[in-house]
């Protein structure tokens, strides 16, 4: 247990200390995984906190909600709650914000129609989710990525994360840092909570948006950086063994940022050292998220802390 004071959190219209934000055990979302969520990072640059891709995350939450027959608050309200969350807690470290829309009714049975929606938004301090510099040892999972036509992978559906949990747990139990999913066509898909890029002959390749991936916001940012650097980017089906012969492989996501992969299924990638394209993208991404790249200032929403 932490001896830090509990952060304030938003729960269905009220602000409360996080441990007091409770739901009944028969809550629909708890029983059936009915809901969708986001993960947003805030970076503390020593002087102020800036939220990364705030609007983009809430746009995706609203699109997830629409696909899942749920009613999300409007974009302005979602952004305002997240900003107020930070202002109330005044963190002076990097943070991770978790907004979630969930079925808060308590009716029996999985039908979502006429079951009321709830909304929560809380934050925790967060450094690195994966060690971005160590070089990850990853495996191809024995679990297949769920098909978009089973649980829409384009949404960040709560229940869909059981698939990620199985793959990540298997990887950790087997001594790996992370798992790479293949989709039900046997093509490379994504990590348990990351999109994947491989480098072959100086170009970036990543599974396209019909490969059962989450349409990652970091993925899009990395494509933008690569294109600005004149590095060709190909969104296309990727075969499993392309992983083993790639010059470089890295994972991207809000949590893992840009993390380089050292080996896959115990095969060293690029001689087991970080490759030049990975290093360049990683540096550029880090500069942007800490507000050191004026060209990417639009990625960030600074949060002012009003004087008490
Ligand atoms: N794929 C999955 C399954 C994820 O959970 C995440 C994390 N949100 C990502 C990819 C990366 O997405 P983003 O860059 O938007 O965080």
Image (spheres, grey):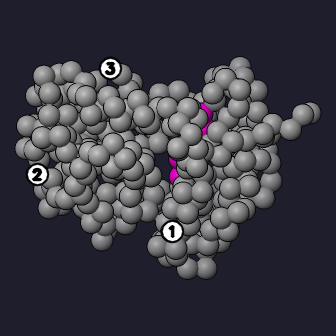
Label pair 1/2, CB-CB below 8 angstroms: no
What residue is pinned by disc 2? 239
Magenta region, main secondary structure: strand
Give the position of the C terminus as an image quadrant: top right
Q: Nearer the viewer, residue 231 or 125?
A: 231
**Which quarter of the picture shows residue 138?**
top left
- Res. 292 visible in picture: yes
What residue is pinned by disc 3? 134
As drawn, 33 above or below 143: below
Determine if the C-beta at disc 3 is less than 8 A from ligand 1.
no
- Res. 140 visible in picture: no
Give the position of the N terminus as an image quadrant: top right
The residue lying at 30 percent from left, 71 percent from top is 149
Label pair 1/3, CB-CB below 8 angstroms: no
- Let me know if residue 1 is in the magenta part: no
- Crowd band around label 1 with a 10 angstrom C-alpha radius: few (<14), some (14–19), many (20+): some
Describe residue 15's horizontal placement relative to residue 131 as left or right.
right
Q: Say which element carries label 3.
A: loop
Label pair 3/2, CB-CB below 8 angstroms: no
Q: Which residues are magenta?
A: 38-43
Residue 63: numbered disc: 1
């Amino acid at each position: 247990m932490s001896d830090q004071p509990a952060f304030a959190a938003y729960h269905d219209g009220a602000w409360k200390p996080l441990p007091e934000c409770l739901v009944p055990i028969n809550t629909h979302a708890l029983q059936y995984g009915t809901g969708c969520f986001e993960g947003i990072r805030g970076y503390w640059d020593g002087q102020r906190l800036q939220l990364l891709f705030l609007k983009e995350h809430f746009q995706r939450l609203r699109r997830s909600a629409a696909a899942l027959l749920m009613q999300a608050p409007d974009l302005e309200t979602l952004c305002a709650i997240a900003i107020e969350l930070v202002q109330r807690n005044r963190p002076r470290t990097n943070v991770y914000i978790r907004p979630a829309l969930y079925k808060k009714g308590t009716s029996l049975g999985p039908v979502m129609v006429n079951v009321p929606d709830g909304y929560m938004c809380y934050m925790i301090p967060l450094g690195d989710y994966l060690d971005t510099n160590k070089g990850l040892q990853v495996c191809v999972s024995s679990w297949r990525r769920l098909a978009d036509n089973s649980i829409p992978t384009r949404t960040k559906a709560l229940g869909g994360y059981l698939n990620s949990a199985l793959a990540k747990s298997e990887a950790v139990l087997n001594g790996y840092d992370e798992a790479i999913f293949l989709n039900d066509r046997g093509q490379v898909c994504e990590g348990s909570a990351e999109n994947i890029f491989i480098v072959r002959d100086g170009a970036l390749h990543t599974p396209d948006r019909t490969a059962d991936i989450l349409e990652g916001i970091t993925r899009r940012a990395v494509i933008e950086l690569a294109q600005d650097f004149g590095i060709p980017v190909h969104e296309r089906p990727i075969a499993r063994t392309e992983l083993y012969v790639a010059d470089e492989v890295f994972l991207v996501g809000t949590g893992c940022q840009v993390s380089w992969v050292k080996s896959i299924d115990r095969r060293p990638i690029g001689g087991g050292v970080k490759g030049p394209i990975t290093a360049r993208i990683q540096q550029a991404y880090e500069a942007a998220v800490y507000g050191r790249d004026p060209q990417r200032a639009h990625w960030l929403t600074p949060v002012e802390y009003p004087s008490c």
